[in-house]
Amino acid sequence: MKSAIFLLALTPALLLGNARRDTLDRISDATTVLNEIMSAPDQSIPQDILNNAQCVGIIPGVKKAGFIVGAKYGKGIMVCRTPEGWSAPSSVIIEGGSVGLQLGAGETDVVLVVQNKSGEDKLMADRFTLGASAGLMAGPVGRTAQAETDAELHAEILSYSRSRGLFAGIDLGGATLRPDHDDNRALYGPAVTQRAILTGKVAPLPAANPLYAELNRYAGRETR
């Protein structure tokens, strides 16, 4: 009986520890994704777009659920610029929608570049739908993007994907983005909110330093 009570008491702590480890692994995966994408200059996010990014979201390995036609699901992280540098990473979930026809079977990495404060404000909602009404557009890729940036400057969020080695702008049509409250609480404590994380009211994680280094490397203006 005592053993059963002990296990019941221990289970929440174990689940919390697992969630924390999974989220830290996701931060590491996001760092790898950003480095690999930006290492191919002719097929990467244009430098001038990252220079002006207000927030960057990276969702490694969005999965297609075969038992539900068109359903997609993935967990990733989001960081935003603050006066002191990049914010602590907030865990986010993307789900539903078409998430691009190029997904097919398997997994796709998704990157979101939030270009202004208006786009950042949308991240503070418990859930919002990505699409043209949210000021979202498929982002330009590579060195030829300069001629396209006038149109993209009017978008609040630019979206990209990488699947089977191919990198391109992506139409996320109807997908939703929301904070992963459970994982964020595992990292930062029970009272945390996504707004507090992304606006710099939560101390950055040392485990995210490699991600900050990659962002500073490719985002041009050093912020940390």
Image (tube, rainbow, N blue to C red):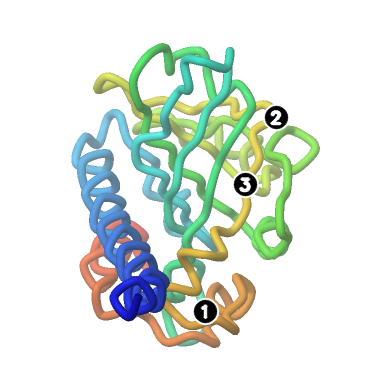
Residue that badge 3 annotates: 177
Identify the secondary structure beneath mark 2: loop
Residue at screen point 62% across, 46% down: 177
The disc, 3 or 1, on the residue closer to the chain's N-terminal end is 1
Q: Amino acid at mark 2?
A: Gly
Other residues around mark 2 within 10 Å, as few (<14) / some (14–19) / many (≥20)? some
Horizontally, residue 110 falls left or right of residue 123, namely left
The Cα atoms of the two marked residues, 3 and 1, are separated by 21 Å
Residue at screen point 52% across, 34% down: 139
The Cα atoms of the two marked residues, 3 and 2, are separated by 10 Å
Identify the secondary structure beneath mark 1: strand
The quadrant in which the C terminus is found is bottom left
Name the quadrant containing residue 107: top left
Percent coordinates x, y for residue 188 in the rendering: 45, 80
Horizontally, residue 70 falls left or right of residue 163, namely right
Residue that badge 2 annotates: 174
Q: Is residue 61 visible?
A: yes
Residue that badge 1 annotates: 82
Marker disc for residue 44:
none
Percent coordinates x, y for residue 157 in the rendering: 61, 46
Q: Amino acid at mark 3?
A: Leu
Horizontally, residue 194 falls left or right of residue 45, namely right
Q: Relative to 121, say whether 164 is above or below.
A: above
Residue at screen point 64% across, 26% down: 97
- CB contact under 8 Å: marks 3 and 1: no
Of 66 and 104, nearer the camera is: 66
Percent coordinates x, y for residue 23 in the rendering: 35, 61
The quadrant in which the N terminus is found is bottom left
